[in-house]
Every structure is written in C-alpha cells, then in structure tokens.
C-alpha cells in the first residue's frame, strides 16, 4: 500500500463521513459547513490523483461559490438556523428508500462494468478541458448560472416584506 493509497482512503473516509453528517444533522448551517469539508476532501482526492485543475475548480466553484451562495440564501430567507423539530419526519422511510437506491446503484454499477479493466485514455490538458467546457457544455453552464442568480433574487424578495407589499399592507 503506497502513500497515495493511504491518502485516498483517508480523504475518502472524510468525504463520506462529512457527507453523511450533511444529511443527518438537524442544523442547517452546520450542514453547509459539513458540505464544505466534504467538497474539500473531494478536492484533495483530485490532487492525489494528479488532476490539479479539477481540484482547483472544485475549490473555487463548489467550495467557494455554491456553498457561500447556499449560506447566503439561508441567511437572506430568515429560515430557522437551529434545529427544528416541527419539520422533522420519521427517518425509517428515508432509510429504506436510500438503502434501496444505494443497493440498486451498486448492482447497476457491477452489472455495467462487470469488474473489467479498461485502458486509460490519453492524459488531458487544460486546453482540452477548456475547449470541452466552453464548447459543448457552455449552454448548461450558463443556464446553471442564471438559475442560481434567480434563486438568489427570489431569496432577497422573500426575505424583505416591504418588496411587493401594497400600500398599507406592511406589518
């Protein structure tokens, strides 16, 4: 077992553990911070695998932008930040559905690849990746940015009672 294997196992354990903490915690802000840890561990995995560009994109886009947008949206909507027992639902249906989906995906993965070894493709470059992202994938990239902007504007409108209120309707 090499040093890279140990690092991959450790970072994978951190990513899976913090990912589980994201979906099991009842505190919304803590879930966002656990998401930062999980996405940071994924960036570390990319670094160990030698994909430095993908690791930096992971840090800049996901850790830097998406999580910050999520936390700002939570703060702007004035959602309850602490634990809220009135919104909790029974956990056993979610565990059954999650376990079934996980088992189904594992079976699908095992059936699709049948534990075969595949030859590695030619190593990618930043130029090839940029051409792919801004060539074939530019439309989904721009649609996602518009969707995130609309969500942020909607959060601002929802958090301010004076916007959209008629004269005399403000409380």
Image (cartoon, grey):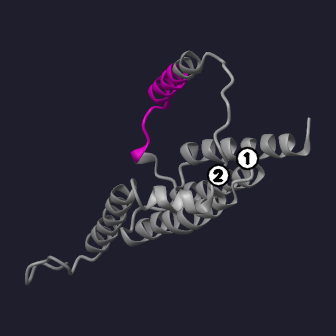
Which residue in the rendered view is the most extreme toward the front? 122
Q: How many residues crowd around disc 2 within 10 Å: few (fewer than 14), some, or many (20 or more)?
A: many
Q: How many discs appear?
A: 2
| Residue at the spot 73% in from the left edge and 42% down from the top edge | 12
Return the x and y of residue 93 as percentages of the image width and height: 44, 26
User: What type of secondary structure mainly makes up the magenta span?
Assistant: helix
Residue 30 vertical position relative to residue 94 in the rendered view, above or below: below
Q: Range of the magenta residues?
A: 87-105
Residue beneath disc 2: 38
Instruction: Compare residues 7 and 70 and report the one nearer the observer.
Output: 7
Return the x and y of residue 69 as percentages of the image width and height: 46, 67
Q: Is residue 80 left or right of residue 130?
A: left
- Marks 1 and 2 sit apart, C-alpha to C-alpha, by 7 Å
Q: How many residues crowd around disc 1 within 10 Å: few (fewer than 14), some, or many (20 or more)?
A: some
Q: Is residue 149 left or right of residue 108?
A: left
Q: Is residue 148 left or right of residue 1?
A: left
Mark linked to residue 14: 1
| Residue at the spot 48% in from the left edge and 25% down from the top edge | 101
Image quarter where the N terminus lies is top right
Quarter of the image for residue 150 reads bottom left
């Amino acid at each position: 077992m090499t040093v890279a294997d140990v690092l991959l196992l450790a970072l994978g354990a951190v990513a899976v553990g913090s990912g589980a903490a994201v979906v099991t915690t009842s505190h919304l802000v803590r879930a966002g911070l656990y998401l930062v840890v999980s996405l940071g561990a994924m960036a570390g995995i990319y670094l160990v695998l030698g994909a430095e560009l993908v690791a930096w994109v992971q840090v800049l886009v996901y850790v830097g932008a998406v999580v910050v947008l999520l936390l700002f949206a939570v703060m702007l909507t004035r959602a309850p930040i602490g634990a809220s027992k009135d919104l909790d639902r029974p956990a056993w249906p979610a565990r059954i559905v999650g376990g079934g989906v996980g088992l189904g995906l594992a079976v699908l993965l095992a059936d699709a690849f049948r534990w075969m070894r595949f030859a590695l493709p030619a190593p990618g470059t930043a130029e090839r990746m940029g051409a792919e992202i801004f060539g074939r994938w530019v439309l989904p990239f721009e649609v996602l940015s518009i969707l995130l902007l609309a969500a942020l504007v909607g959060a601002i409108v929802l958090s301010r009672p004076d916007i959209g209120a008629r004269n005399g309707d403000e409380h």
